[in-house]
Amino acid sequence: MTFTLDRRAFLRTAAATGGLMTLPGLVSMAQAQDITPGGTLRVALNITPSVLNPMLLRLNSEYLLAEMLYSGLTMLTPEMTAAPDLATEWSASEDATEWRFTLREGVTFSNGAPLTSADVVASFTKLLDPETAAPGSRNLGPISEVVADGDYAVIIRTATPYADLPVALTYPTAKIVPTSIIESDFDSLGQTPVGSGPFRLAEFIADDRAIVEKNPDYYVEGQPYLDRVEVRTFPDAAGAAAAMLAGEIDLLTEIQPTDYARIADGDGIEGMRTPSGRFLDVVMDCTVAPFNDPKVREALSCCVDREAMVELVAEGYGTPGNDSPVNASYAYFSDAPLKQYDPEKSKALLAEAGHPDGIEIDLIASVKPDYRSAMAVVLREMAKPGGWTINVKTMDHPSYLDQVWKKGAFYVGYYNMQPTEGTIFNLLFTSDASWNETRWNNAEFDALVAKADATTDPAVRAELYAEAQKLMREEVPALVPCFFDLLGARAEKVMNYEQNPRGANYALHKVWLGSGS
């Protein structure tokens, strides 16, 4: 197949064809001489992982554990390209509807069973089965069939051409588990992980800690460098920050903007900041009043001072949003003039929509992360002059997940950057998106995304994705007021940890502890 590529597309395709293939965790010879194996890394979380089955994950904390315990066919690089994991190489048919992945030989699961193509076929079959209700199944693309090609290769066919397949397969839920477990006791994965990742679970106490230990049979010789990783749960961000400053933990993958400067200035601590497509959005159910009227959604959009939102909610550690989930961190970002704060226009639109006296409505926000409720409060104040009376109601995160997420009519959502434009659109905004919280149903948007996903021509994809972003800015199924930089901190002794802009990948198998550990 022949592609005309921009830089990012080139990297993706080069990885697919082996041209830029990078072994997981590969470090230079100079670095290798300095690596100190052993030791325990202490990581802090403030949202408890509660799901261990890799196909049913929903939270970053759960992605972190799964990444240490399981392997997938490919893994995501910081450049949003696919690197080999269990698959050592891959190639596509001319029309990008049939992909062949060659598997690494000699890999074993933690129960001692060898990993073969049968396990890959069984895992994807289970993951894509609607009865499994895997939250991320739609993110893998239009996969129609997965079959074995001998013991160490699989063929994946897609219903339409899909150039992003190797990147889509990096999704955290696309992990490989033994056929025997799937066929006999799939539910046991909720308590007993059986994977081929760099670590094995030693202890798990919900709401408290998870401890993993080095997998001596991991397929990359010498890795992981750490003996153990202790993942500790803190009830709130303040507790995690205090533990970091006290030297009780070594790595904070998530820091609230309000705490970042204070923590980053701590003795022996290095702050980490990476631009990202991570965003908060204000979800509006487009099928029920008042948000079934596009004029009402546009009216609320007029009530957002986006640059002020970056300062007030992200503490300046972010960039303004324009009611599309795609920003400059993506390959096919389409820039447009930033929407301006215009409360008078909001009032006029509300009057046209039959609300001359304004609208009073409840806005729900989880208390985690903290800036969800902060954004809700700021929006409340910004929208007052525009004819909106917004009653902010907060709730604990488990209650939010059970009662509001994908069910509520008006609430604050929170999403990581996705590897590609297609994955974020198909996750949240196409009519059949697995997490179509807004219930927005726009056939033109669906067609644009489908065509872009199916073509391998970067110029055509750029044009189609640009039209899709324009439609979102106009129709406003959700407010996207600002994007957040990734903020974290590490003890200076933590070596080779790199933030991934996606925000859900950690690569702790590459980390080691330097002097002072």
Image (cartoon, grey):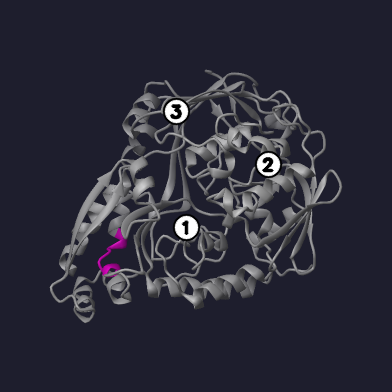
> Is 63 left, or right, of 32 in this rendering?
left
Image quarter where the N terminus lies is bottom right
Q: Name the spot of residue 187 as percent of width and height, x first.
A: 58, 36
- Where disc 3 sits, the SS reads loop
Is residue 337 visible from the viewing direction of this image?
Answer: no
- The numbered mark, 2 or 1, whose residue comes first in the sequence reads 2
Mark seen at residue 435: 1
The kind of residue tagged 3 is Ala
Q: On the image, numbered disc 3 is attached to which residue?
A: 206
> Is 69 left, or right, of 502 in this rendering?
right
Q: On the image, numbered disc 2 is attached to which residue?
A: 176
- Where disc 1 sits, the SS reads loop
Would you say the residues marked 2 and 3 are in contact, meaning their CB atoms lie under 8 Å apart?
no
> Which portion, as a residue range, is magenta?
300-307
The kind of residue tagged 1 is Trp
- The numbered mark, 1 or 3, whose residue comes first in the sequence reads 3
* Residue located 68% across and 41% down the image: 176
Would you say the residues marked 1 and 3 are in contact, meaning their CB atoms lie under 8 Å apart?
no
